[in-house]
Image (cartoon, helix red, strand yellow):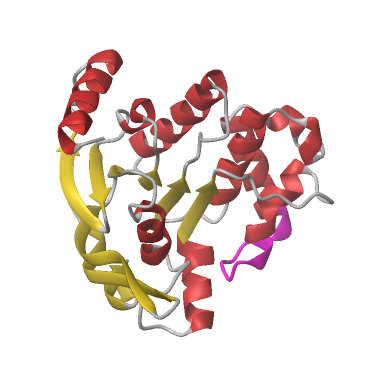
Amino acid sequence: MATVMDIRDLCKTYVVDKRQINVLKNINLKVDEGEMVAIMGPSGSGKSTLLYSISGMDQPTSGTVVFDGTDITSVNGNELAGIRLDKMGFIFQQMYMMKNLTILDNILLPAYESRKGGTREEKINKGEELMRKLGIIDVADNDINEVSGGQLQRACICRSLINSPKILFADEPTGSLNRASSNEVMDEIVKLNQEGMTIMMVTHDSKVASRCSRVLFIVDGNIKGEYINDTSADEKDRERRLNNWLLDQGW
């Protein structure tokens, strides 16, 4: 299977009050096409920093991140912005949407900004197709305050997919949702992965992580452990096994 992302000797250091804080310490990691990887760890362990550093949202202090054949740590700002817009999708815990736009227009915004081709009508059709696929086409013309949290997060998934990315990054995508909405959103994310989408997500929820193919456990900026989920086991069994492993890691 082809490697979509190759991270080597990745470090991230901050200086606070003349004191050096090493948030990431020589991270080495490969992500293959079609994988669904969860990043877990205690608060302050560096998991979100890792996600931001490998997706080009934050500049690492040292190391390389080769994504789709390009070292994104060495390209200029405009080229990096283009790569992130055209080849990466992002879902966050806080659902950043423009208040003055409808749900559909929010979904279409990255498509209008993208360098990828296609007419306006084709982009609108794709946005509507994604909304139909995720079961929210009936709220296309609604304002963002006229839908439920689960609907809004599914709209964020549609927006992240509008430019047909090679990888989807998610930072606590179910963190602000109730359990029912969380299950709905995870069902959609799992479907995307089953269709071939590569996904990396930060989560504190072992139920969410148990649905991923691989789980990385980070402590103090280092990957302390790696767990491969048994996808043939039923959901409750996967969650139980993962929880036992997490306890062994000091979760």
Q: Position of residue 64 (x, y in %)?
A: 27, 75
Say if the magenta span includes residue 19: no
Say if the magenta span includes residue 117: yes
User: In which quadrant is the C terminus drawn?
Assistant: top left
Q: Which residue appears at 56% of the width and 67% of the height?
A: 116
Q: Which residue appears at 60% of the width and 67% of the height?
A: 114
Q: Which residue appears at 18% of the width and 37% of the height?
A: 249
Q: Is residue 153 above or below residue 178?
A: below
- Asked whether, in this view, residue 188 is left or right of residue 98, the answer is left
Residue 209 or residue 46, whichever sits in front: 46
Q: Position of residue 210 (x, y in %)?
A: 29, 28
- Asked whether, in this view, residue 86 is left or right of residue 29, the answer is right
Q: Position of residue 128 (x, y in %)?
A: 67, 40
Q: Which residues are magenta?
A: 111-122
Q: Is residue 80 above or below residue 241?
A: below
Corner quadrant of residue 144: top right
